[in-house]
Image: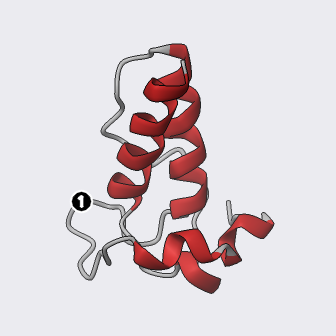
């Protein structure tokens, strides 16, 4: 599954660290989808996830090769503050 959401081009993701290797499986996961899932989990106070293989892939825009784990953690932290 490939992400087609507009968040792939949001400037907010430009400052995320890059995932240059694929040892953890996160290099091609859409960082925008990971961020949004982290935000929802943080708001709902769900346990943090470590596996993102269920999320869509993306090689487009500002999320290209960005670290999905960092994006998720950032969203989770923001969600915790919002809840």
In this view, the residue in front, 25 or 39, is 39
Q: Residue at x 54, y 36 (%)?
A: 39
Of 48 and 12, the residue lying toward us: 12
In the image, taking residue 7 as reference, residue 31 lies left or right, namely: left
Quarter of the C terminus within the rendering: top right
Residue 79, image x, y percentages: 51, 31
Q: Is residue 55 above or below residue 64?
A: above
Q: Position of residue 77 (x, y in %)?
A: 39, 36
Residue 81 position (above or below residue 35) = above
Write down the residue under mark 1: 24
The way the protein has been coloured in the rendering is secondary structure
Write down the quadrant of residue 36 in the picture. top right
Q: Residue furthest front?
A: 81
**Quarter of the figure with residue 82:** top right
Looking at the image, can residue 4 be seen?
A: no
Relative to 8, residue 54 above or below: above
SS class, disc 1:
loop
Whether residue 62 is visible here, answered yes or no, is: yes
- For label 1, count other residues whose C-alpha is less than 10 Å away and answer few (under 14), some (14-19) or many (20+): few
The x and y percentages for residue 25 are 32, 61
Q: Residue at x 27, y 72 (%)?
A: 22
Residue at 30% of width from left, 75% of height from top?
19
Residue at x 44% of width, y 25% of height: 80
């Amino acid at each position: 599954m490939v992400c087609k959401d507009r968040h792939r081009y949001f400037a907010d993701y430009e400052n995320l660290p890059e995932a240059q290797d694929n040892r953890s499986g996160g290099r091609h996961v859409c960082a925008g989808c990971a961020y949004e899932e982290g935000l929802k989990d943080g708001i709902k106070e769900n346990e943090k996830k470590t596996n993102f293989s269920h999320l869509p892939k993306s090689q487009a825009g500002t999320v290209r090769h960005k670290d999905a784990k960092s994006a998720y953690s950032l969203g989770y932290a923001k969600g915790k503050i919002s809840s």
